[in-house]
Image (spheres, rainbow, N blue to C red):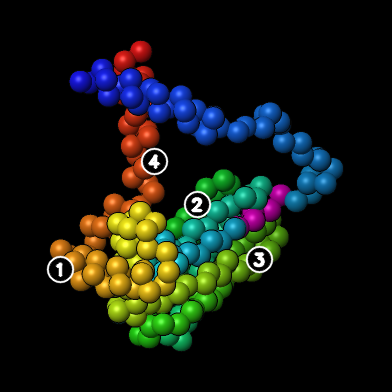
Amino acid sequence: MRGQITRGILALLLATSLLLVPIRADDEEGVIDDDEYADVQRAHLIVRKFVKDELVVQGKNVTVEIDIYNSGLSTADAVKFQDVLPAEASLVEGSLEADLGKVSIGSHVKHSYVIVFNTGSVEVTLPTALVTYVSDSETNEVTEGASTAMALYVMTPVQQLQRYALQAGAYASLGFARTPSDWRNLAIIIGVVSSLLGGNWVVKKVQASNVNRKRAAALRELEKSD
Ligand SMILES: *[C@@H]1O[C@H](CO)[C@@H](O)[C@H](O)[C@H]1NC(C)=O
């Protein structure tokens, strides 16, 4: 039985092996022009501001994460972070300001806080945060940088249920429901069923990461039987 399964997996892997071969360009050493960079011994911070999912729900906690990376050639000192909230949100945990101290070359510091959106059915752009730091310890030069911004869609709780239902419908109908009204009817049925069952299980099934996990498990199984 187990052998059969393994052979089945093997056949599947052979059939999909073209998809599994990573596409890799020839390794190439990065060439840095010394003349151009010789006099730039400064810290350079790259600031990424993001939330894990760009679809968030009104009234639910949303963690905003800030990742500050020093891509420069010197330690950044006296790193200060300062942020603002979008008008639709309020802060529930953490701080919009932080003294983050030093960030050495090639390393990250992270900061996060939690907000809640007070309105739904709106698109919101998280404003850029401001980061200041001493980029050159000899001259004490202070540099100012802005984070990335990120667009979010804030769903109302009802929209979230509808989304679950639609995802469940797309999965369960296996493509039979093609027109919007087919979808709607399925969505209503499945939405009711899945919310009775606690809502989340169908959505979790749909997630592509499951497929990837299964594929990884199949690969491990194959390696074992070699
Ligand atoms: C939302 O954040 C607040 C503040 O940290 C916390 O007290 C609350 O338990 C959180 N709610 C959920 C559902 O995680």
Kindly tell me whether residue 57 is visible in this rendering: no
Image-quadrant location for residue 176: bottom left
Compare marks 1 and 4 and give the one earlier in the sequence. Answer: 1
Would you say 43 lies left or right of 85 here?
A: right
Image-quadrant location for residue 62: bottom left
Disc 1 marks a residue whose amino acid type is Leu
Query: What residue did someone put label 1 on?
Result: 196
- Residue 121: x, y in percent? 41, 82
Q: Is residue 25 magenta?
A: no
- Residue 87: x, y in percent? 46, 86
Compare marks 3 and 4 and give the one earlier in the sequence. Answer: 3
Badge 4 element: helix
Q: Which disc, if any, is residue 212? A: 4
Q: Split into 4 quadrants, where in the image is the C terminus?
A: top left
- Disc 1 to disc 4, C-alpha distance: 29 Å
Query: What residue did someone put label 3 on?
Result: 143
Compare marks 2 and 4 and give the one earlier in the sequence. Answer: 2
Badge 2, how many Cα within 10 Å: few under 14, some, many 20+? some
Mark nearest the camera among 2 and 1 is: 1
Disc 2 marks a residue whose amino acid type is His
Disc 3 marks a residue whose amino acid type is Thr
